[in-house]
Image (cartoon, grey):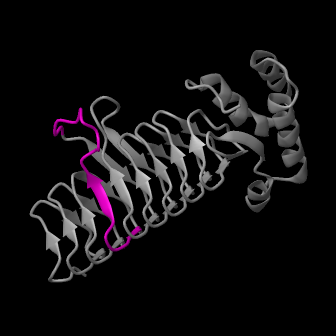
Amino acid sequence: MIDPRAVVTAGARVAADAEIGAFAVIGGNVEIGPRTWIGPHALIVGHTTVGADNKIFQFASIGEAPQDKKYAGEPTRLVIGDRNVMREYCTISRGTVLDQGVTRIGSDNLFMAYTHVAHDCVIGDNVIMVNLAMIAGHVQIGDWAILSGYCAVHQHCKIGAHAFLANNCGVTRDVPPYVMAVGNPAVPHSINSEGLKRRGFSSDQIRNLRNAYRLLYRSELPLAAAVEQLGALVATQPELKPLLDFIQTSERSLIR
């Protein structure tokens, strides 16, 4: 399953049923899981672990050194889960010692062509990054978030679960779960109701989230007062808990 024209460095661990295309380069500290397909001319290097059933297309660069001038060659890591798709020219860097030393990618994500994931990022599951979306170092992205084309996310920002970033968004502060953001700099637009419908949220749950959005962004209440009111609703509207937890742990402040 390894093309004879591929370069697999001694020390690499490749599952017997993984497939590696012509002229792909696999570094000596790389582990490739079962049934993963590596396209021609793809590059996977560094201390990188790739799980099962991933598809890494031609010319992707996975696990290279971070684009951080403070990086001094430390043996940091990149850990990738299962069933991810990384399209042409996708770039994902490994971590730095200034953070946890690891970039983490979950499972079932789609990284379209020319997307970039910088050092020390943490990406959940079922995330979509559309062509040319880019995230800087230390960014965290929750499950089911979608980053449209040409999005750019500032370092240390957090994108909540089920959030949607419209095309050309420039994100400099945290985007709460469920929220659709637009513009540069990004501002809140609405709840991502269409995405929530597709993921099985009931009409009642979506209505509750819309009301929470209005409380947070349209009521003109101070943030602390809005959070207090949201907290009183969580017991009967548990779908609000991820939103409330996110707000209470935000470090860069929320988009407003």
Q: Where is residue 155? Give x, y as percent.
A: 45, 36
How far across and how far down the image is residue 95, in percent? 31, 41
* Res. 234 visible in picture: no
Residue at 14% from the left image edge and 72% from the top image edge: 7
Q: Is residue 230 magenta?
A: no
Which picture quadrant has residue 243? top right
Location of the C terminus by quadrant is: top right
Drawn side of residue 102 relative to residue 251, left or right: left
Q: Which one is in front, 27 or 49?
A: 27
Magenta residues, as a range?
54-74
x 28%, y 38%: residue: 68
Quarter of the picture containing the N terminus is bottom left
Q: Quadrant of residue 138?
A: top left
- Chief secondary structure of the magenta portion: loop
Q: Is residue 28 left or right of residue 211?
A: left
Whether residue 63 appears in magenta in the rendering, the answer is: yes
